[in-house]
Image: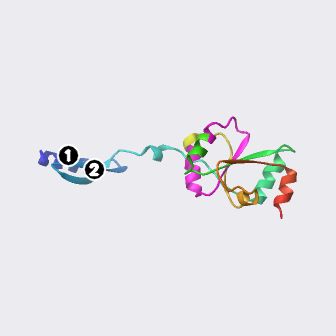
Amino acid sequence: MVGDLGMTLQSIRNSKMTKTLSITLLAAGSTWLFPLYGVASHDAEKPAANCPPLDKKKLKEIVEASEGKKVDLVFFSSWCSDCGNHLKKLEGPGKVLVGTFDKQPRIEKLVGKLKLPNRCFTDSGVAKKLKVTTVPAERSVTQETLSLLQN
């Protein structure tokens, strides 16, 4: 049986499939690690969103484009389970997502995974200016608020 298993593993390794996933095989009290080709992680299939950095200059452009309406910023992090639940409940694309306290690839991966229609950015100092210390958090920004941020 062990010989048959070795032949099967060799044929899997020699196949032309490209993606790998390591799995553990327990046999006769031994633990064997081997690559299994052709099994893709679910996360690898999810497209990432594009979440460029949001700084004061970009925020000013967004507020000016809103034609006097307030802009709702939703601050979140990929590691925050409450944030994920909060983001799933957002209605429509009216709110702007800002990933903060986190790395850009993780933020983009979460937004892509949730397939959110909202514009997405990564924080470049805006959260600190708006005194965001926890996530999830929402802040409304208007022309008046924007002038306070310039200081």
Residue 150: x percent and y percent? 83, 62
Tell me which residue sits at (69%, 60%) in the image. 124
Name the secondary structure under disc 1: helix
Q: Nearer the viewer, mark 2 or mark 1?
A: 2
Which residue is under mark 1?
8
Q: Quadrant of residue 56?
A: bottom right
Give the number of callouts: 2
- The label on residue 78 is none
Residue 110: x percent and y percent? 56, 47
Residue 4: x percent and y percent? 14, 45
- Residue 89 colored in magenta in the image: yes
Query: Mark 1 packing: few (<14 Cα in 10 Å), some, or many (20+)?
Result: few
Residue range (magenta) = 86-112
- Residue 21 colored in magenta in the image: no
Instruction: Give the Cα separation between the discs numbered 2 and 1.
Output: 15 Å
Tell me which residue sits at (77%, 54%) in the image. 59
Q: Quadrant of the C terminus?
A: bottom right
Q: Quadrant of residue 72?
A: top right
